Structure formats: structure tokens, C-alpha cells
């Protein structure tokens, strides 16, 4: 609890909007109030003093949906990317969809980070979390899950040139251009 008093009577919500709350990667937000430009609650014992602002967190989403004469392809993925001390790829999405297509989705996210690093858009260690994944039993396969996660990671980096994804009905594969 903060014991300092501010001379201004600005509501806490407004101050939190102007000063993003600090937080540790992989943990719940630290409840901090900023009074007169000072962080009032100290770092709890045993916690890292390196904080990441919410502006360092990226999120991306991609919905892949194609209907051809013979088949349909559908997958919807959302990712959250934040700085970390080492590369981490995980699926926190709940439900059968993440269990069925979690491994291919992680492979797609890993390929996207590798490609972004080759082009210099992602350098630091990152924690990539697939927070949502939706597929259907009839219309989603492993390649669809892989490509949806791949594209979701790319959408989290708007400064990078986004690949254009097209489905080749003759070859029954996804083609990037």
C-alpha cells in the first residue's frame, strides 16, 4: 500500500492509463499505483526487478477459412508474444482443439519466429503463447493449424512484410507468396 500522498486529486484509473502497470513476464500483473512519478510498492522479495511494460507485449490473430469444391479448410489462432529470459513456446488455450492441434500450431509459431529472426524483426528471447485455437473435426488438419499459428505470429509484427497465403486446390496445399 502506498503511503505517499499526491497533491493532485487525479483518479487512480486515469493515472494507470498514463503510466502502464509494470509486470513480470509469465505472471499476473503487479498492482502498482504511481504517485507523483514514484513507484510506491517495492518489488516483493524473491521477484525479479526487471519489469516489462505492456507496450512490449504483442498479440496476433489469424483466421484461415477456405472452401473448395471438394474440401474446406478452417483454423483460427490467437497468440501472445512477450519478452522472456529464454525462448518458450506454449499453448494455454483450453479445450479439445488445443489438444488435437497444439503440436502443429506450436511448430507453425516456431517457424514464424525463426523466419522473423532471419529478417531481423525478432531478436530477443520470446515467450510465445497460443492463447486461443479453434478448428473443426471435418475441416481442420495439421497443416491448417500450423499455417494459422504461423500467420498469427506474423500479424503480431506489423513492421514485417506479411506473407500472402493462398490455397492451391490442385495440389491441396497452402502456398506462401
Image (tube, grey):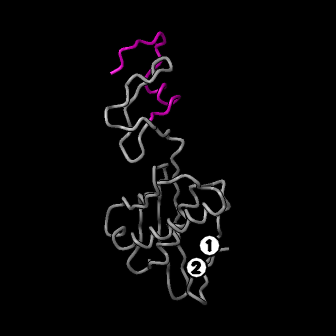
Based on the displayed image, in which of its 4 quarters is residue 169 positioned?
bottom right
Q: In the picture shown, does residue 31 fall above or below 162?
A: above
The reply to whether the C-beta atoms of the residues labelled 1 and 2 are less than 8 Å apart is: yes
Mark number, residue 100: none
Residue drawn at (56%, 55%) of the image: 156
Q: In the picture shown, does residue 30 fall above or below 38?
A: below
Region rendered in magenta: 1-22
Mark number, residue 165: 1
Image spot of residue 123 (x, y percent): 58, 54
Q: Residue tagged by mark 2?
A: 174
Q: Secondary structure at mark 1?
A: strand
Q: Secondary structure at mark 2?
A: strand
Mark closer to the chain start, 1 or 2 = 1
- Decide whether the magenta segment is chiefly helix, strand or loop: loop
Residue drawn at (31%, 65%) of the image: 95
Image quadrant containing the C terminus: bottom right
On screen, residue 125 versus residue 100, left or right, reads right
Residue drawn at (54%, 61%) of the image: 153
Image spot of residue 45 (x, y percent): 31, 32
Image spot of residue 97 (x, y percent): 36, 69
Q: In the picture shown, does residue 33 fall above or below 119?
A: above
Residue 4 belongs to the span the image colors magenta: yes
Which of 82/93 is in front? Answer: 82
Image spot of residue 81 (x, y percent): 49, 53
Q: In the picture shown, does residue 11 fall above or below 57?
A: above
Amino acid at each position: 500500500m502506498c503511503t505517499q500522498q499526491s497533491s493532485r486529486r487525479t483518479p487512480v484509473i486515469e493515472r494507470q492509463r498514463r503510466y502502464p502497470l509494470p509486470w513480470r513476464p509469465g505472471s499476473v500483473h503487479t498492482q502498482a499505483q504511481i504517485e507523483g512519478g514514484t513507484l510506491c510498492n517495492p518489488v516483493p522479495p524473491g521477484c525479479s526487478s526487471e519489469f516489462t511494460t505492456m507496450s512490449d507485449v504483442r498479440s496476433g490473430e489469424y483466421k484461415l477459412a477456405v472452401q473448395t469444391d471438394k474440401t474446406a479448410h478452417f483454423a483460427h489462432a490467437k497468440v501472445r508474444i512477450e519478452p522472456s529470459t529464454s525462448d518458450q513456446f506454449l499453448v494455454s488455450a483450453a479445450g479439445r482443439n488445443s489438444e488435437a492441434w497444439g503440436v502443429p500450431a506450436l511448430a507453425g509459431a516456431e517457424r514464424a519466429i525463426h523466419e522473423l529472426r532471419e529478417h531481423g524483426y525478432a531478436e530477443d528471447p520470446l515467450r510465445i503463447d497460443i492463447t486461443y485455437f479453434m478448428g473443426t473435426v471435418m475441416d481442420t488438419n495439421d497443416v491448417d493449424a500450423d499455417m494459422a499459428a504461423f500467420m498469427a505470429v506474423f500479424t503480431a509484427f506489423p513492421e514485417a512484410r506479411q506473407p500472402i497465403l493462398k490455397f492451391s486446390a490442385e495440389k491441396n496445399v497452402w502456398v506462401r507468396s
